[in-house]
């Protein structure tokens, strides 16, 4: 199993660094460009949500740890943060068939992530949130 780690400050200007890290790891894992792009989008959305919601956009509010692992079946991205416990998978998916004017805000990012990644799971270990996203190799 191949594993790479990166820790970034929980600020918006660090997101491109996180995305570049994941893109490089996904390419090394042998993912095609469409799958690499899906990983990029999922990491961008997840990090943005952590910074804006868990850390309230405050500098020095916390860090984000990214771990990329590759085995014979999956390329796995684990994103950890120190925000309050929050399971983004617990809320029901928004309905894309609803008319635009009837749609509620919120939930669209995780809905999108669940649709571009092959597996998405959430865990809280008593201290940190972890969102685990997998793409088939």
Image (cartoon, helix red, strand yellow):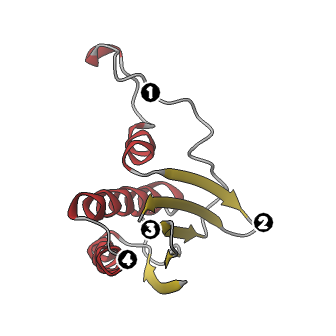
- Please name whichever residue, 107 or 37, is drawn nearer the observer in this view of the structure: 37
Foreground mark, 4 or 1, reads: 4
The numbered disc on residue 126 is 2
C-alpha separation, residue under disc 1 versus residue under disc 3: 28 Å
Q: Residue at x 47, y 86 (%)?
A: 4
Foreground mark, 2 or 1, reads: 1
Judged from this view, the residue extending furthest toward the front is: 72
Q: Residue at x 32, y 74 (%)?
A: 30
> Which badge, 4 or 3, comes first in the chain's sequence?
4
Q: On the picture, is 78 further left or further right than 127?
A: left
- Please name whichever residue, 59 or 72, is drawn nearer the observer in this view of the structure: 72
Q: Are marks 2 and 4 in contact (CB under 8 Å)?
A: no
Q: Are marks 1 and 3 in contact (CB under 8 Å)?
A: no
Residue 10: image x %, image y %?
Answer: 44, 73
Quadrant holding the C terminus = bottom left
C-alpha separation, residue under disc 2 versus residue under disc 3: 23 Å
Foreground mark, 2 or 3, reads: 2
> Which badge, 4 or 1, comes first in the chain's sequence?
4
- Please name whichever residue, 84 or 128, is drawn nearer the observer in this view of the structure: 128
Q: Are marks 4 and 3 in contact (CB under 8 Å)?
A: no
Foreground mark, 1 or 3, reads: 1
Residue 33: image x %, image y %?
Answer: 21, 64
Dot 4: element: loop
Dot 1: element: loop
Q: Quadrant of residue 91?
A: top right
Circle 3 residue:
58
Circle 1 residue:
94
Q: Residue at x 65, y 59 (%)?
A: 84
C-alpha separation, residue under disc 2 versus residue under disc 1: 28 Å
């Amino acid at each position: 199993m191949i594993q790479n780690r990166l820790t970034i400050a929980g600020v918006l200007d660090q997101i491109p660094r996180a995305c570049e890290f994941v893109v490089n790891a996904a390419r090394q894992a042998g993912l095609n460009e469409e799958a690499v792009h899906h990983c990029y989008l999922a990491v961008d959305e997840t990090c943005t949500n952590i910074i804006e919601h868990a850390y309230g956009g405050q500098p020095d509010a916390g860090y984000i740890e990214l771990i990329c692992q590759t085995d014979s079946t999956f390329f796995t991205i684990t994103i950890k943060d120190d925000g309050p416990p929050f399971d983004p998978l617990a809320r029901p998916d928004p309905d894309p068939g609803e008319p635009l004017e009837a749609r509620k805000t919120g939930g669209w990012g995780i809905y999108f992530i669940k649709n571009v990644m092959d597996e998405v799971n959430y865990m809280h270990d008593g201290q940190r949130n972890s969102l685990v996203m997998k793409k088939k190799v």
